Image: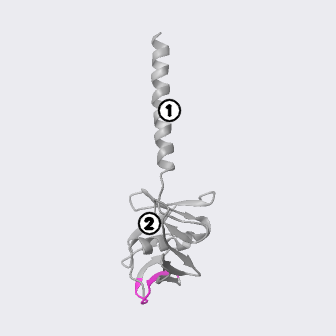
Amino acid sequence: MKKTKSALILCTVLIAMCSSLMAQDNYKHPQLNSSGQVLDSTGTKLGWIKEGVIYSANGEKVGKIEKEELLDYKGHKLGKIGKDGTFYDPKGAIVFTIEPGSKGEKCKIFDPQGKVIATVHESYKNQACAIHCLYKKMPAH
């Protein structure tokens, strides 16, 4: 009887842990999807990126990516993009990193503490800073 009760408790704990892990992985994050659209965690379109130009939801240019740098619409440097997609602020501090060696269409984006903060379609890994740009609600010109 004791073994059965212990096994039941162990199974309950394992199920709870697995459910918790699955819930964290399925949590909705901001994303840059396969169409280049930047969506917030509720699915609202914040803007998009096309040919390195970042647009707000109402179609105004708010930034651009040029030579591995993120620039605002006036040309001011906002950060640098590493070859692996890591994004650095103008002082060289890491703003976010992208899941290395990810398989599948969606890649996780991590803050410096290792927390998942967004996802990006694999074809936009080096343009993930568009999410940062649109979340900062940069002014448009």
In-image side of 137 versus 43 (left or right): left
Q: Quadrant of the C terminus?
A: bottom left
Q: Is residue 100 visible?
A: no
Q: How many marks?
A: 2
According to the picture, the residue beneath numbered tag 1 turns out to be: 15
> Residue, x 50% and y 79% (percent of image)?
54
According to the picture, the residue beneath numbered tag 2 turns out to be: 96
> Residue, x 47% and y 48% (percent of image)?
24
> Residue, x 58% and y 70% (percent of image)?
124
Image coordinates for residue 100, horizontal then vertical, percent = 55, 60
- Which of 90/104 is in front? 104
Indicate which disc, 2 or 1, sits on the residue closer to the N terminus: 1
How far apart, in angstroms, are the residues tagged by discs 2 and 1? 32 Å
- Which type of secondary structure does the marked residue at label 1 adopt? helix
Q: Is residue 25 visible?
A: yes
Image coordinates for residue 18, horizontal then vertical, percent = 50, 38
> Residue, x 48% and y 14% (percent of image)?
3
Q: Which residues are magenta?
A: 68-77
Image coordinates for residue 112, horizontal then vertical, percent = 40, 62
Is 71 a magenta residue? yes
Mark 1, other Cα within 10 Å: few <14 / some 14–19 / many ≥20: few
- Which of 44/41 is in front? 44
The structure's colour scheme is one colour
- Which type of secondary structure does the marked residue at label 2 adopt? strand
Going by the numbered disc 2, the residue's amino acid type is Phe
Q: Is residue 90 above or below residue 46?
A: below
Looking at this view, name the residue that lies furthest to the bottom.
Answer: 74
Q: Is residue 56 above or below residue 116?
A: below
Going by the numbered disc 1, the residue's amino acid type is Ile
Mark 2, other Cα within 10 Å: few <14 / some 14–19 / many ≥20: many
Image coordinates for residue 45, horizontal then vertical, percent = 50, 69
